[in-house]
Amino acid sequence: MQLLSQLLYHDRIDFGAPAVTDGRRSLDYGELIDRSGRLAAAFVDAGIRPGDCVAIHVRKSVDSMVAVHASLQAGAIYVPLDPMAPVSYLATLVHDCATRVLVSDASGAVLADLVEQTDLDVVIGPDQAPATSRCIPWAAVGELDAREPVALVDDDPAYIIYTSGSTGTPKGILHTHASGLAYAKLAASTYGLRPGDRLANIAPLHFDQSTFELFAAPFAGSSVVMVPEPVLRFPASLTELVEREQITVWYSVPYLLIQVLQRGALDQRDLRRLRWVLFGGEVFPPGLLAELMSMWPHARFSNVYGPAEVNQCMYFHLDEPPIDLGAVPIGRAWADTEVAIVDDDGQVVEAGTSGQLLVHTSTMMDRYWNRPGLTDGSIRVRSTSTGGTGRWYATGDQVVERPDGNLVFLGRADNQVKIRGHRVELEAVEAALLDLDGVADAAVVGAGPDELIALIVPRGPVDHRELLVTLGARLPKYSVPTGIAEVASLPRTATDKIDRRAARELLPETP
């Protein structure tokens, strides 16, 4: 098996075993195969051919799992959209991936607005769609004959994950069937996934962590529990679901685990079925991690590292709370992967010296969608341990190797930050600010964990709340600053770039 489109058809799958549940509906693997095959037929009937994009605008549910695997089986590139993002932002992604087919469970008003701002021809899902497009309701999909996966090769494109772009235009990370399947195999092997495991699908569909449940679970024959978005807002409800659904494997950003630790009613829950807790996407404060591990002594914890461009590439297993460990390492490369730490000239640094992390792995993306210049700037051709040459991804992350061989993350070399696991380019937020009336200049700086502050040079009196509301209609929620501060001017370097270290000093003091 070399294709993601074949994940549901390999010989380890028990057709009667549970595949996915969302609390309202459940499918076994036989039912998942049938439903995804019928939706794949709908895609083909709608004109989708191998290499075309299908946008998935569906809340986490049985339907989202079906939509992903149907897209792969039809040979399409699935493009997950954030159901909570502003319509104008979603329209940008739909235009960029040039799709004319959308799977959605959105309300009529949202869907009508999205269709009006794009060139969508076919909408699959809701019972009624705007008159400007052809609607194929779920009921009609159920009447189609399921089709077998179309013929593909392992280097065919499989999915695009969009992240914030430095120019304000989101950048799409294109993975192939080969890179996605390599990730599924390595994740299932590294964390010992097996039939009977129940994986909590906590990450949003448009977030790269979601591929763990979407791909690794079927590869291992495990089942997936889709955690509804509303449940994630209430840590006590989340832990109640984990107990009720007997979750065995958890994967999320540290922020959510910290919320569970502080407000998850852990003293009232029996979570002994939880055997492995994976976290990644941002730094987990060691003290809080140690406190959580002491409350879940039956579970093994792992710090997972890997930008969306390479899925995952490193891990650090913790069998005991990190007492006097300092920063939790990102660990070592997993199988079929090489890493190198280099200086600004691309030369490997001496042990104990910090530098940029480069990664060579079978789980690496093919390229950035429609961004050849960005691809060329991020991919390096270098020697590998086998004696030949290969493609290496320049992560932009600064790391250092400890004497025990584990790597420690030090920070970014560019202007990316992580907000609850989401990558945000500060320039993207600044570009949106500069597009607003009344803003002459702008800089965005981090003011603490999960907090961005916008420094603006106003053209006159401006309403800060109105600016933030306007930004909220143009950007994903996680990238909207939490506050605005006005300054007379912004500090700049000799090359006229914003001096972010000096700009941070302009932040107003908090009591």
Image: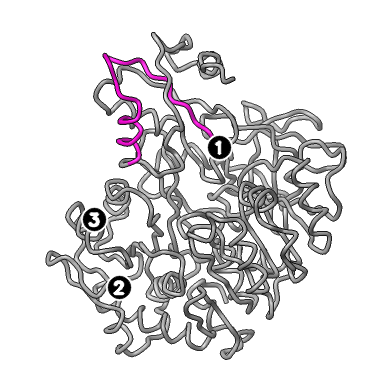
* Residue at image mark 3: 114
Q: Amino acid at mark 2?
A: Gly
Q: What's the CA distance linking mark 3 and mark 2? A: 14 Å
Left/right of residue 55 with respect to residue 420 in the rendered view: left
Along the polypeptide, which appears first: circle 3 or circle 2?
3
Q: Which mark is residue 450?
A: 1
10 Å neighbourhood of mark 3: few (<14), some, or many (≥20)? many
Let me know if residue 468 is in the magenta part.
Answer: yes
Q: How is the image coloured?
A: one colour
Mark pair 1, 3: CA separation: 29 Å
Report the residue marked by disc 2: 125
Q: Residue at x 50, y 68 (%)?
A: 154
User: Where's residue 199, x and y in %?
Assistant: 63, 69
Q: Residue at x 46, y 11 (%)?
A: 491
Residue at 39%, 43% in the rendered image:
372
In the rendered structure, does residue 382 fall within the stretch colored magenta? no
Q: How many marks?
A: 3
Answer yes or no: do the residues labelled 3 and 2 have beta carbons within 8 Å? no
Which element type, helix, strand or loop, lies under badge 1? loop
Residue kind at label 3, given as amino acid type: Leu
Q: Which label belongs to residue 78?
A: none
Which is nearer the eye, 367 or 321?
321
Mark 1 or 3: the one toward you: 1
Q: Which residues are magenta?
A: 450-472
Q: Earlier in the sequence, mark 1 or mark 3?
A: 3
- Residue type, numbered disc 1: Asp
